[in-house]
């Protein structure tokens, strides 16, 4: 074979190898090898870090934040470098359980160079390592759970392309500096006493207390905690006894934690538990977190977190709402509980548009005929509440239902001849009503006849009913 043919064959082989390399997940792309920005390198320098120092990633779902921590050269401990707004994730607070539940995971994960994907369909990405040994011990399933770009999610943590480019590049440089893997702490929220008290009634609270132990280990040491699993829970910075190992599904063996770390974590946990107990008496549980629709792309200036309007029931947290009365207007906050209302003596005529009662107390019909009184005007309909003409404003008892026109009161006693004579002689209904007020009480207290015009200064002051479902309450 001539030298020319050998050269052509070699070139063809090189092209074939290059083409195969482009199909590899680890093949480089222009976006995967871009350098760090001068601004980010300057920020690292200000904080005593270098581009190739190790990194650690912390994620907070509720706040929709991702923090990149970097190890300082001065003391070898991690310090916060930069915080990013998470562009989008799907699901709600709580762990990922199974494939297809569109839930972003929570837990402690490791990312190796093999999990980096420079050819992602979502600009750049890396697999965060779900499910880990702890997840598998609980039977949790799922694949390809990533942090990536494009601001769309179906169970991943999605960033903007510019954000994932910075995070991906920092991870690449840390690997180049010798870091074997970096830790991802995916947490439901910042594990403070205030947040633990707010979420104390959540079904995931036991799991979150376990996550808080790992978070506390990082907070007091600023070192990446060593993470193991046994007894279907996480254990941190633990060394098992001789001839023992940590098995996620087996009971935890006896183990030790470095005394300085154990004391610091125990002190923080004790102080937090005291504060959690105090706050649990002072603040109501937080409303349920609304599931996020990860397939709705957004810009970073748009809100991500929606809070449901359905909150857990809390004693004495909401005032009772009085039924709407035709003569009063909209619903309003009920007054403080009052004793049952005493019988009210009415000294004015009652106006309804229904048929007149079978008997009229005090000979009112004949009195009106002889005196030439006109029938009172009727308002409303047969189903409208009864209105009392010219009644003085008064409080309505909280347990007192509105009186309807069809309500039937106690049967009045016959007026007798005395009532007829008084009507003829012109004594009138008012005097007769006063004489018979004690033995003959109305069926229920009546609302006033005419309400003030509904205006801005007379608007009801009731709070919105917190039990009304929000328009955002369902995941789509």
Image: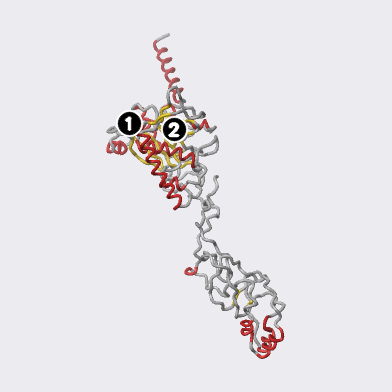
| Residue 3 % position (x, y) | 39, 11
Q: What's the mark number on residue 53?
A: 1
Disc 2 from disc 1: Cα separation: 26 Å
Label drawn at residue 235: 2
Q: Nearer the viewer, mark 2 or mark 1?
A: 2
Tell which of 48 and 28 is nearer to you. Answer: 48
At label 1, counting other C-alpha atoms closer than 10 Å, the crowd grade (few under 14, some 14-19, many 20 or more) is many
262 vs 443, left or right, is: left
**Residue 138: x %, y % from top left:** 53, 33
* Left or right side of 447 for 229: left
Residue 171 position, x and y percent, is: 38, 32
Q: Quadrant of the N terminus?
A: top left
Tag of residue 311? none
In primary-sequence order, the first of circles 2 and 1 is 1
Rendered image quadrant of residue 373: bottom right
Task: Confirm or deny contact between disc 2 and disc 1 (CB under 8 A).
Answer: no
Where is residue 371, by image quadrant? bottom right
- Look at the numbered disc 1 and give the secondary structure of its residue: loop
Establish if 406 lies above or below 474: below
Give me the residue at 54% from left, 62% from top. 321
Q: Is residue 165 visible?
A: no
Q: Which of these two is toward me, 124 or 102?
A: 102
């Amino acid at each position: 074979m001539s030298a020319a043919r050998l050269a052509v064959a070699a070139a063809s082989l090189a092209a074939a190898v290059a083409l195969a390399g482009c199909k590899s997940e680890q093949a480089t792309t222009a976006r995967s090898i871009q350098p760090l920005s001068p601004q980010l390198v300057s920020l690292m320098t200000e904080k005593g870090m270098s581009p190739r120092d190790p990194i650690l990633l912390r994620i907070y779902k509720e706040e929709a934040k991702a923090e990149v921590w970097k190890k300082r050269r001065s003391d070898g401990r991690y310090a916060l470098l930069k915080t990013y707004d998470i562009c989008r994730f799907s699901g709600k607070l709580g762990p990922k359980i199974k494939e297809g539940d569109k839930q972003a995971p929570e837990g402690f994960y490791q990312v190796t160079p093999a999990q980096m994907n420079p050819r992602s369909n979502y600009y750049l990405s890396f697999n965060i390592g779900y499910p880990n040994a702890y997840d598998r011990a609980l039977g949790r399933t799922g694949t390809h759970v990533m942090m990536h770009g494009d601001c769309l999610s179906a169970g991943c943590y999605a960033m903007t392309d510019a954000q994932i480019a910075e995070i991906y590049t920092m991870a690449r440089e840390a690997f180049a500096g010798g870091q074997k893997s970096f830790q991802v702490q995916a947490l439901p929220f910042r594990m403070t006493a205030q947040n633990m008290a707010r979420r104390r009634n959540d079904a995931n609270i036991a799991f979150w207390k376990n996550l808080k132990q790992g978070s506390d280990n990082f907070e007091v040491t600023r070192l990446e905690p060593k993470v193991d699993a046994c007894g279907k829970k996480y254990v941190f910075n633990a060394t098992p006894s001789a001839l023992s190992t940590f098995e996620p599904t087996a009971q935890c063996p006896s183990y030790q934690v470095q005394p300085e770390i154990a004391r610091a974590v125990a002190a923080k946990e004790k102080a937090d538990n005291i504060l959690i107990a105090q706050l649990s008496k002072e603040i109501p549980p937080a409303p349920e977190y609304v599931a996020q629709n990860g397939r709705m792309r957004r810009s970073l200036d748009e809100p991500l977190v929606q809070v449901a309007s359905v909150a857990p029931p809390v004693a004495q947290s909401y005032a009772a709402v009085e039924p709407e009365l035709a003569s009063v207007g909209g619903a309003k906050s009920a007054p403080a509980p009052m004793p049952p209302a005493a019988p009210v003596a009415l000294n004015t005529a009652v106006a309804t548009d229904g048929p007149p009662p079978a008997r009229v107390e005090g000979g009112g019909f004949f009195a009106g005929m002889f005196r030439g009184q006109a029938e009172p005007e009727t308002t409303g309909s047969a189903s409208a509440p009864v209105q009392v003409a010219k009644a003085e404003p008064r409080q309505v008892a909280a347990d007192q239902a509105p009186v309807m026109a069809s309500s039937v009161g106690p049967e009045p006693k016959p007026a007798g001849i005395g009532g007829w004579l008084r009507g003829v002689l012109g004594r009138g209904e008012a005097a007769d009503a006063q004489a018979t007020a004690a033995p003959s009480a109305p069926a229920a207290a009546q609302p006033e006849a005419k309400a003030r015009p509904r205006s801005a200064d007379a608007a009801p002051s009731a709070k919105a009913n917190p039990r009304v479902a929000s328009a955002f309450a369902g995941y789509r």
